[in-house]
Amino acid sequence: MNISTISCTRTHILRCFPSFYYGLVHAVFRADSSSFSSCSSNLIEELPSIKSLLNNRGREFSDSTLESHLQMLISSIRGTTSEDEVFSSLSQNRSFLSIQLSTSLVEKLLLRFEDDWRSALGIFNWATEQPGYEHTCDTFDMMVDILGKAKQIERMWLFLRETCYQNLISLKTMAKVMRRLAGAGRWEDAVKAFDDLGTFGLEKDTDSMNVLLDTLCKERKVELARELFYKLKLHISPNAYTFNIFIHGWCNAKRIDEANWTIQEMKGCGCSPCVISYSTIIRAYCQQSNFEKVFGLMREMEAQGCLPNVVTYTTVMHSLAKLGEFEEALKIYERMKSVGCRPDTMFYNSLIYILGRAGKLQQAVHVFEIVMPMEGIKRDTSTYNNMITIFCGQLQEQNALNVLKGMEESGLCKPDLRTYDPLLKLRFKLGKIDNILDNLLDDMIDKHHLSFDISTYTLLVHGLCRANKCKRAYLIFEEMVRKDVMPRYRTCSLLLDEVKRNNMDDAAERIEALMRKLKISKR
């Protein structure tokens, strides 16, 4: 049939199988020039979008199938109590023979049972036996991490030593092993894991040494890491990252003198300190509010040609603002511009926050609406949240809602719970418990699918109690408990007074029972 006789609309094409699309493309390119020219130009223009839509439909089908298989497998596991039972349950269900096992499906299953090592191990062993499926390094590492997290150390070692998995063991795997051992307080075993690298076909080199040292330093065992380093450096050369690990470790331990000494040692070994080295120490001085040292170190950086970067400036500016030194904080912005350091999203988020705290509303709006777009800096959720908080602090509810609307329409990011907290607080502060409050809550749940955390639940219960909406506050409280979000004792106490005042005796009994449990759990 000549292509010129084809008459079908975009709607009709979308009802056809994907193979029709490819057949049509093939026909178009085989057609002679006269028949090609007679083909509808609109149809040709639609072909890329048709392909995209068909691909999307394919992905939707694939995702729904994956989810269906996931739920089937999870249902089969319910009620089992050991890895052998899980393995047996999955193996004996013949309907699972039709499931084409994929890495994505196995990863989702392991994530679903990451807090249940027995089920996870049963799933892993069952997947190992499935025809046509092979575990990847990622799924293997996930299983190792699940066992380590559950402190099943001996089981983890047995798992690692199973010969069928030897080719999946990498330095990333052993890093997880060392970190889980160190996290369980088994420092000697973490060191032994490093010593045994050769048995798994891995090298004891600079990279693996850094993994061990970083693991120990993050667990605040800097002195032990230092002792090992002195032994290891006799046959393993350190690099700049090695010394940065120690600088970070000493700073976390609030031993900044040792961190400064490490800078000198670093230079002695022929490694140049980088902006990360200095910025780590600057952050530690900021935490001590020792800004004399901060600015001294910044001058030293500049003298050595290692200029502070945007992270350095953001750290200093934000630390000054936390102390209420807003004018000094804003001078950091000017200093940064003078040396040509380009701000990023995080820097502007901090600047907007500082301007708001300093009462400089118009300057904050200018940065948000003019400066960031002009410099091509993308706004993220925190950027919008800061502006919403500032407007709510100034009781400018409509402006805050306009920012929220702009956020939703931007396509750059989505609201989170912290987006709505200042808006909810403002509603209660203004004493307006009306449809706007309900609209906000509906948007949070239905539009953005947000699950309330303890902060949001607490805000709602306290706000409704103070607004004399006791029954509604109690309904929120019941939902909170039902979803296993444990209320604070103060929240219970406040609500208890209100329900008693409103003669809600059954509610009072349930709150008192929960308060007794909270007291016991604190002992």
Image: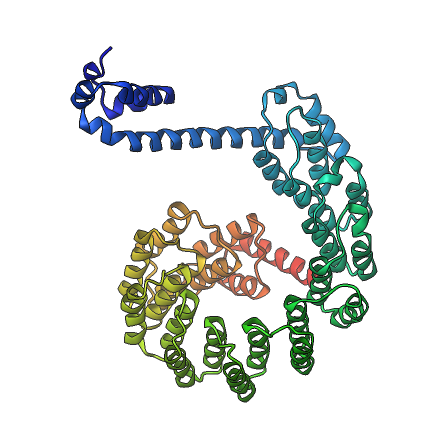
Which quadrant does the N terminus fall into? Answer: top left
Q: Is residue 465 left or right of residue 36?
A: right
For residue 19, above or below residue 48: above
Q: Is residue 115 left or right of residue 159?
A: left
Residue farthest to the bottom, as pictured: 292
Residue 117 drawn at (x, y percent): 72, 42
Q: Nearer the viewer, residue 358 or 139?
A: 139
For residue 273, above or below residue 38: below
Residue 459 drawn at (x, y percent): 46, 62
Q: Quadrant of residue 241?
A: bottom right
For residue 12, above or below residue 349: above
Which quadrant does the C terminus fall into? Answer: bottom right
Q: Residue at x 66, y 68 (%)?
A: 245
Residue 439 drawn at (x, y percent): 33, 52
Q: Is residue 4 left or right of residue 365?
A: left
Q: Quadrant of residue 333?
A: bottom left
Q: Residue at x 57, y 54 (%)?
A: 485
For residue 71, above or below residue 303: above
Question: In this figure, which colouring scheme has been used for the structure?
Answer: rainbow
Q: Quadrant of residue 516?
A: bottom right
Q: Residue at x 40, y 65 (%)?
A: 345
Residue 326 drawn at (x, y percent): 41, 82
Question: Total number of numbered labels?
Answer: 0
Q: Nearer the viewer, residue 325 or 21?
A: 21
